[in-house]
Amino acid sequence: MPLDADRPTEMSRAAMKAELLDAETELALAYAWRDERDVAALHRLITAYMRLAISMASKYKRYGASMNDLIQEAGLGLMKAADKFDPDRGVRFSTYAVWWIKASIQDYVMRNWSMVRTGSTSNQKSLFFNMRRVQARIEREAMARGEELDGHQLREMIAHEVGVPLRDVEMMEGRLSGTDFSLNATQTTEEDGREWIDTIEDDGARGDELVEQDHDRSALRLWLGDAMASLNTRERFIVRERKLREDPRTLESLGEELNLSKERVRQLEAAAFVKMRKHLERHGSEVQNLLS
């Protein structure tokens, strides 16, 4: 049965007409696909259990996804199950496929619940699909006992029941309580009202900070230029080639050009840095502040 049928009802009708496989036939088809990559056997296996996939997909309609999309995802999970099924384990294919179908549907629902990633860990998935049900049961039981639970008590009981940390319950409660909100929406109903994005603080540098940064960079360039001028021609050449190029040269290549050993070039470089450091020390703490 094709997964791209026009309507879910058509897919459901086609699935209900599919054959019911007995254990021996199912096993034979599974072996044929695993050992011989028999596409016809795979198609027969998938078609026979598509009713299972559709039945499971229908349980997730309350999460807002279209039934057609849920069936598509269930079908993908069914095909993954068929591809990974090992008939030697002595387990019925339908039992094995349930887990793959459920995982595929749940992943799809969580991906499409919100533009913000809702969760991916096993704890978060368990909360997403069980939190409301567990919460409703706890509230019913508390009401039957004549108890009134505050929000914190309720979240603690949910965390204990599901077996997850309290912070995960608090996070998921926030995720499930609201929907995506556009920052470009206006704060009022007026057309020229300010958008919410305008209320977000700009993380960029302020105007006074930019002026100060430009001043500091200019001062630092001037001081470094003076320090370079205190070097002789060969020392300036070594520092420039070693530190100021996008692709710094090696001591060996400079030694070959200057007809010096690699160790001698290293010594000249170290001596040049000492001279520059002493020259910059005249500016004292100002240089340290700019370089920190």
Image (cartoon, helix red, strand yellow):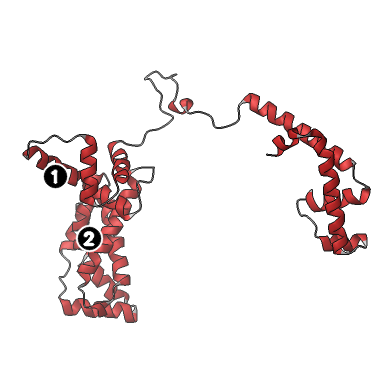
Q: Is residue 143 left or right of residue 263?
A: left
Q: Say which amino acid is labelled 1.
A: Arg
Label 2 packing within 10 angstroms: few (<14), some (14-19), many (20+)? many
Question: Which is in the foreground here, disc 2 or disc 1?
Answer: 1
Depth check: give the residue in front, 17 or 135: 135
Residue at x-position 17% and y-position 36%: 149
Secondary structure beneath disc 2?
helix
Mark 1 lies on residue: 137
Residue at x-position 72% and y-position 37%: 288
Q: Is residue 283 left or right of residue 256?
A: left
Question: The C terminus lies in which quarter of the figure?
Answer: top right
Q: Give coordinates of residue 53: x percent, y percent.
A: 22, 60
Q: How many marks?
A: 2
Label 1 packing within 10 angstroms: few (<14), some (14-19), many (20+)? few
Mark 2 lies on residue: 53
Q: Give coordinates of residue 12: x percent, y percent.
A: 19, 57
Secondary structure beneath disc 1?
helix
Alpha-carbon span between mark 2 and mark 1: 28 Å
- The reply to whether residue 147 is in sight is yes
Depth check: give the residue in front, 126 or 83: 126
Q: Which mark is residue 72?
A: none
Q: Is residue 192 left or right of residue 233?
A: left
Q: Say which amino acid is labelled 2.
A: Ala
Instruction: From this view, report whether residue 142 is shown above or below residue 97.
Output: above
